[in-house]
Image: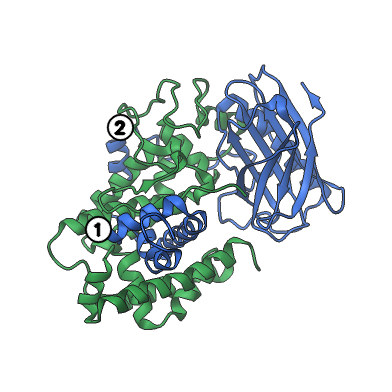
Amino acid sequence: MAARPVTLRGRSDPARATASPGRDVTAPRPETPGKRPGGKPVAKKPIPWNGPSVSDSVQRMGIPADRLPDETLLAGLGDGDAELSLAFVRRFQRVVFGVAVTVLGDPTTAEDVAQQTFERAWRHAQVYDTRRGSVRAWLSTIAHNLAVDVLRARTSAPVDPQDLPALLTAMTDTPERFAVAHDSAAGLRRALADLPGGQARAVAMAGIYGMTARQIAEAEGIPLGTAKTRIRDGMEKLRTAYLREDVGDE
Amino acid sequence: MSENGMTCGEFADVAAELALGVLTGRERAQAVAHLDQCDSCREHVRQLSLTGEEMLGLLPSREPTEGFESRVMARLGVTAPDSDHSPAAGGAALATAPGSGGGQGRKSPARWSRRMLSLAAVALAVVACGLGGWALRGVTGPSAGGGSTAQAPLREATLTSATTQQEEGKVYLYDGSPRWLYMGVDTHNTSDKTVICQLETRSGRVITIGSFQLQGGYGAWGSPDPVAASDVTGARITSMTGTVLATAHFTTSH
């Protein structure tokens, strides 16, 4: 198997530094909304095309926009297609806003971050690489990075430790809809629920609120080394659960 | 030990922090330097990064305030269409929405035929619409086809199961400008959710092009700019562990 791109979250980069053009959401894009970039690809991954838009093809095939795959809606967003863009926003607005408001707590700021997220998605739709994950995960990551940047600009503590139990409950609670449908994250959800309390809090504080080990140590009143160990051990357990799902064990 | 002094063991202690973007200062610089020189640690941190991204998917969804979608559309400079977006009456649904659970059952001959027919149509649509590089998962149903403008050679090959020798998909290789590869798989011979696409060349090299996911054994995937088509003699699908699941040999062009 060929080496796959490694993506690291950058502290000052709202969209993450990356070693792969296929996921480089910081790549430049022409500023004119609703138009393709003149046939010149932003990165190597996407195919430049000056012909019919995605929506033209969709209409020829008679596919309702709300039933199209995520990737096709994203391509439509990149094209500036009104119908596909609206379908894209409708499909993902709850996810994006959910990430932003969870991290920030403030609905007003969260809405601004959510809007910025869709703007980023439009701007970088053509460098989205399906091999690096789902559109949902990609959007969530953009929203998360933007929200964490806002959070870090604040002087107040990123999160009140008293709020963490509720968040962890929400993240590990199995929604009713997953009881009848396949929950692709069921293993990760269970693994997070099974983590010792200290590890789960450390993982949430680092992974959701972008807190450093030192900040976690101060918030929890524990030594720095203990905070680092909790992040490492917790994430390793989640990684094991994620890999088990990814290889398709059923 | 790497040149900057950080060992793999030391890197493992901070890999999760690096993947989550919370490692700072000299530790981060040393870790990144180590990453540049160590493939196994790079793979390790890649897995941790993906785990962190998946964890974000566990966050609860929330309904934004009313009018959010309009404000987003205005911000993008896109005029929202009329609110009536109900599916067209009688329109054949070519694609199921992600997560809809469609296509979980075993394939029937009729479904197989429909899928392969629609796959061919989608492949042509890829030529016409530049959809390469986008996975179109769960494509089902008949197609209205429609106006391919392809003029450069489009080579086609049948994917055959490595165990049963049954047909399990199609591979299309477009040798125009830009070049692209497109394939569809419908198999019941693996429980893998993710499979790897590889190309075989005249010199015997096997080149990994990428990976894509199957839903109920079915998946379709495209990739721009594979190796020069004239050098390609075949394609194959493997499991994540490298087991060859199906192979195809290019013999025709049109």
Which chain's residue wears label 2?
Answer: B
Which residue bears the numbered disc 2?
Answer: B77
For badge 1, the amino acid type reads Gly
- Chain coloured blue in this rendering: B
Q: Is residue A223 left or right of residue B83?
A: left
Which image quadrant: the C terminus of chain B? top right
- Chain coloured green in this rendering: A
Q: Is residue A236 left or right of residue B69?
A: right
Q: Is residue B241 visible?
A: yes
Q: Which dot marks residue B59? A: none
For badge 2, the amino acid type reads Gly
x, y percent for residue B17 = 35, 64
Tell me if mark 1 has few (under 14), some (14-19) or many (20+) residues whose alpha carbon lies within 10 angstroms of its own: few
- For the residues beneath circles 1 and 2, the answer to whether they share a chain is yes
Q: Which of disc 2 and disc 1 is earlier in sequence?
A: 1
Q: Residue at x 28, y 45 (%)?
A: A116
Q: Is residue A222 left or right of residue B33?
A: left
**Helix, strand or loop at disc 1?**
helix
